Amino acid sequence: MSGQNEKLRAFILAEFLPGESPANLRDDTPLRTSGILDSLATLRVVSFVEEQFGIEVEAHEAGVENFDRIADISAFIDRKRAAKS
Amino acid sequence: MAAASANPHLAAILEASATRFPERTAVVSPDGSSVTYRQLNDQADRIAAFLVRRGVQPGDRVGILIPKSKESVIAIFGILKARAAYVPADYTAPAARLRSIFADCQLRAIFIYSGVLNVLTEASPEARPETIVALGCTAADARARGLDGAMDWETVLAEKGSVDTSASRSLDDLAFILYTSGSTGIPKGVMLSQRNATSLTAWASSVYQPTEDDRFSNHPPFHFDMSVQDLYPALQHGAALFIVSEDLGKDPRKLALFISENRLTIWYSTPSILTLLAEYGNLRKLSLDSLRIVGFAGESFPVKHLRKLVDLLPHPAYYNFYGPTETNVCTFARVPTPVPPDRTEPFPIGSACYHCTPLVLDANRNALTPGEEGLLYISGPSVSLGYWNRPQENAAAFLERDGRRWYNTGDVVREDPTEGFIYLGRRDRMVKRRGFRIELDDVQSGLYRHKGLREVAVIAVPDADSGVKIVAYLSAHAPDNKPSIIELKTFCNQELPAYMSPDVFIFLDALPRTSTDKVNFPALQAAFLEGK
């Protein structure tokens, strides 16, 4: 679970926050509502999540409710995986 | 010019279609609700009568700050029927930026969405428009929030009425003002007349050849000049206009489904959106065979992405349209399909539209011969009246020459004997991203409002994926306590439209300076490209 958060953090830092200290991107830092991720960036996160974690994200699932914080994304991945198995 | 003067006033376009196609669907809202041509015309009449009752005069500016919907279109035509000018604005933009726009053009009235009433409630009462019509809440709600005298949309529409301005309409009437990024940090308003919009409408109709069976997309927001080419040609020919909501427009999978399910025939958007559709839209699994024309504009379309799109959707005719807000589309080119396998350069912007005259001049305004690089100037009935209240910028951008008025696009081009005009770039600090114009100094002004920053220099560098990357070089007042990148992103989100937010923030102890103590932009550009 924490490995999952770290993978997400590393991806978001590298792609959208180059130069930021990892400590500043917390599990509960808002991503969408703060402007860190715009809609296009969110699409890239969705693709990353699909490829890395082997799940399929439906269009209606890619909103703020699941993709605003690393903790939310991670919980969403867990739910999708649990539903699959 | 003779052909242009025969074009009808924008309000007359709707009135003629309401007579010819009264029961056909005119506009479909994102929620699926729709209006026929008769309903659209009738409701626009009511809005016009209301505005006139409230004292709105010809030439007055009326703001539209609502999510894209059939109500936006009703408001637009209501305003035009009153011979006033509409000022559409992005309701998701920072409130302070919106207030500066509204103060600049001195709105007489506004249609405003309940979710952004703070744009007005946080302004001093004397800075608010006299007439406020709220959508999405009752007049009582809006008044309870401090907007004395506010009305609501339902009440306004319930009252029958019309005004007949047809005898006094003129193609010289100001039709709308579109605000774009300004280098001073305050957006500047491009004034578009009836002649400007109707000449474009006539030309676009000659390319699209629309009929009442067409189903147009309306993807660009109404504050973006591209929307003009959807709205008026569709409604002049009895076609149906499908409004794409702001949210749907950002979601390629839903968007592709929307095109397929509504069997759209004419699509027009930026290359960024078409790239997303090709990459993420699941196009292989959908039938989009209804599309007969796909147009794009606003930025260069990287050939690898265009090729992918054409491979997935081979049947429509593809057009590359080019033109700044000040002229709207002024050159165009049909893109060959399939895209030739050896093509790597972006396609040319092509030849001039029939209503536009091009001219290429050097920096000293000497005419150049075809094949030489220079600045593209455009003359003709679609050239803007100028910037609202900006005499200096007007003097710099518009030129009288040979008895004609020319707009300096600022774009460097070269004319090729077979391909037409080829876009080569710019010599100033304006860039385009996702079709939107960005003055880098506007981004800089926004960042300078952050109290922790001592120096700010914003540059743009080419990016293979997105076309352009915006990079902010910064120094802090307190180097040991400089703002985090997350804090700066969040700050930009509050100060600037989303498309203007830098992609990269880099702190230096001090910015490099030239011998005359100006920020050394070329050095920053070179440093970034060398990966320093």
Image (cartoon, rainbow, N blue to C red):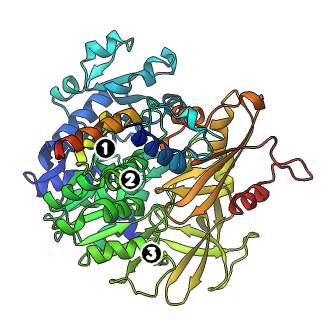
Q: B167 or B171: which is nearer to us? A: B171
Residue at 34%, 26% in the rendered image? B115
| Helix, strand or loop at mark 2 | helix
Residue B372, compared with residue A68, is above or below; it is below
Q: In the rendered image, which quarter contains the C terminus of chain B? A: bottom right
In the picture as drawn, the residue positioned furthest to the right comes out as: B515
Q: To which chain does the residue with label 1 belong?
A: B
From mark 3 to mark 1, how far is it between C-alphas? 27 Å
Residue B458 horizontal/vertical position (percent): 68, 48
Q: A29 or B161: which is nearer to us? A: A29
Residue B472, compared with residue B103, is above or below; it is below
In the rendered image, which quarter is residue B108 located in? top left
Residue B456 horizontal/vertical position (percent): 72, 41
Q: Is residue B1 visible?
A: no
Tag shown at residue B303: 3
Q: Which residue is mark 1?
A: B247
From mark 2 to mark 1, how far is it between C-alphas? 21 Å
| Helix, strand or loop at mark 1 | loop
| Helix, strand or loop at mark 3 | helix
Q: B431 or B344: which is nearer to us? A: B344
Residue at 63%, 86% in the rendered image? B371
The amino acid type of the residue labelled 2 equals Phe
From mark 3 to mark 2, how far is it between C-alphas? 24 Å
Q: B477 or B368: which is nearer to us? A: B477
Residue B26 horizontal/vertical position (percent): 17, 51
The amino acid type of the residue labelled 1 equals Asp
Tag shown at residue B259: none
Q: To which chain does the residue with label 3 belong?
A: B
In the rendered image, which quarter is residue B509 located in? top right
Q: Which residue is mark 2?
A: A48
In the picture as drawn, the residue positioned furthest to the bottom comes out as: B418
